[in-house]
Image: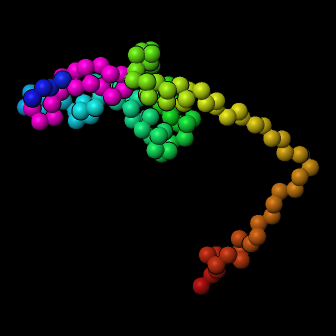
Amino acid sequence: MSDTRKCIVCGKEYDYCPNCIRYIRLPRWMFSYHDENCRKIGAALNDYKAKNKTPIEVKRMLEQTDLSKKETFVPAFKEMIDEVLAVEEPKEVNVEVPKDTVPMQKKYNNSESKFNKKK
């Protein structure tokens, strides 16, 4: 049986066999990815595709990886990366509260609470 596999993210060929004794100490994720960087990219994009994380969260995850060889990635992954990286961070909105506003009053007085009653 051939031990040559192809990384699902970047397409790089590498040797790995999940059933072979010589690869027993290698992580099982090597079944699909040739290195840790591609594993992180794949995990982030899987979360994006499954809608388990927001595009902003996935963008932050991808910013923690090395995307310098993105142009050599498998087209489907490259397109998703471009889509996620195009998402803009929400702009922070500063809302000023007028100084003459009255703070809301509590509904119950602490002394009336059932927890403060004396036995």
The answer to whether residue 14 is visible is yes
- When the figure is inspected, residue 72 is found, relative to residue 31, above or below; the finding is above
The percent coordinates of residue 73 (x first, y second) are 40, 20
Residue drawn at point x = 46 percent, y = 44 percent = 50
Q: Is residue 98 left or right of residue 50?
A: right
Give, as a single range, the part of the protein colored magenta.
Answer: 5-20
For image coordinates 53% across by 25% down, the residue present is 82
Left or right position of 95 against 80: right
Residue situated furthest left in the rendering? 21
Identify the residue at horizontal 64%, vertical 78% (top origin): 114
Which SS does the magenta portion mostly show?
A: loop
Give the vertical position of 46 relative to 2 (above or below): below
Q: How is the image coloured?
A: rainbow
Q: Position of residue 69 (x, y in %)?
A: 42, 15
Residue shown at 36% from the left, 26% from the top: 9
Residue 12 colored magenta?
yes
Q: Nearer the viewer, residue 14 or 44?
A: 14
Which quarter of the picture shows residue 66?
top left
Q: How many marks?
A: 0
- Pinpoint residue 98: horizontal percent, then vertical percent: 89, 46
